[in-house]
Image: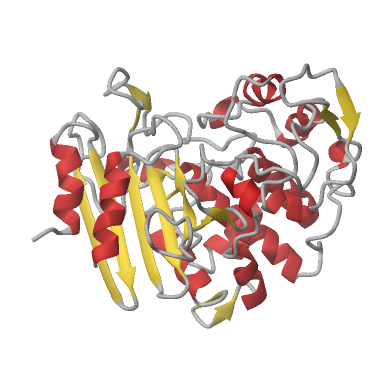
Amino acid sequence: MTTLHNTLEKHVADGSMPGAVGLVALDDRVEVAAVGSTDFGGTSPMARDSIFRIASMTKPVTAAAVMMLVDDGLIALDDPVAPWLPELASPTVVRTPVGPVDDVVPAVRAITVADLLTFRAGYGFPSDFSLPAVALLFSELMQGAPQPQHVAAPDAWMATLSRIPLLHQPGDVWLYNTCSDILGVLIARVAGRPLSEFLAERLFEPLSMTDTGFEVPAGKLDRFTGYYGAGPTDGPELVDAPDGQWSSPPAFPSGAGGLVSTADDWYGFARMLLAEGTFGGHRLLSPASVRRMTTDHLTPAQRAASTLFLEGQGWGFGGSVDVAETDPWNVPGRYGWVGGTGTAGHLVPSTGAVTILLSQRAMTGPTPPPLMRDFWRYAAGV
């Protein structure tokens, strides 16, 4: 009989990763398995409360924080972002995506909050990373593999971003990643305090996400996992040790991929969304905001043009949404996302199911690795 434990253990036993934690929940039934070790050296056994770099599983959390500000009446989805992000008040767009970055035209309209939430603001990654305007996101803004200690502080980061043209006109095309980092700056400026403080007060504390943040305190480093390279030629090369880049606060708290967390912490976040914004008797988000987060906002053409990152899924706010006619996993309505550090978190509003996978081996690209696919197959059969 296949179990969650042996589904994960197979990938630890073949040496592809040191360990993993998986969680599969439906209603009150929760199955958790922790296998292997926190590092390839076998220093400490993996545990349910081991802490991982969750990378792009950060994105739904950031989107939820934006929707809190919408619920508060401080911003609206149709609002231009320029009052809070003046660096984006007069964006320019490359005349053609393959063209030079100095051949630009004005944006035909302002960038809105909704553009950022749906990843259609004009900034981000297409299928071709070599395009001149995209290359600047890597070279100037450190977009890509998370390196929190190497990124400039938010004001300096935004000043640099303002000098990089959009790849497409606002609203036209779905582009990956960069919008979540911009949203992190937007949250801080609208709230009038650092992103880390806002998330701690409005999300992490009410949800008892005690191990989630942009750094791991010294007293918790014994539970923090190592992080390893992606492909067979890289590993088991250690990319970041527990006392490395997440052991101190970053200058730029990345709303796209900067959080560390545990399976149970992210499960609490998922449970809040499944309960239409309520947790422990307290309302954190309005039901309308949760529905907007977990509803696909892309056109068929936009989905079709985004196949490098989306396997037929649509996109809500901060996460993908499986669309019935193109869903590769046969879970219509599933919302969530994967992280490049080997993580994945999803929930299905129609059934109440939650699946969370945390591992320590970097993905080789946007395509989910074998461990992730085996985990999803197991969860689909539970």
Give percent across and percent down for residue 145.
50, 29
Query: How is this picture coloured?
Result: secondary structure
User: Which image quarter is the C terminus in?
Assistant: bottom left
Give percent across and percent down for residue 229.
35, 25
Give percent across and percent down for residue 271.
45, 70
Residue at the spot 31% in from the left edge and 41% down from the top edge = 222
Residue at the spot 78% in from the left edge and 61% down from the top edge = 77
* 69 over 211 or under it: above or below: below
248 left or right of 177?
Answer: left
Task: Please say whether residue 22 is visible from this viewpoint.
Answer: no
User: Which image quarter is the N terminus in?
Assistant: bottom left
* 241 over 253 or under it: above or below: above
Looking at this view, is 135 or 223 the one in front? 135
Which residue occupies the extreme bottom position in the image? 281
Residue at the spot 48% in from the left edge and 42% down from the top edge = 55
The quadrant where residue 346 appears: bottom left
* 364 over 216 or under it: above or below: above
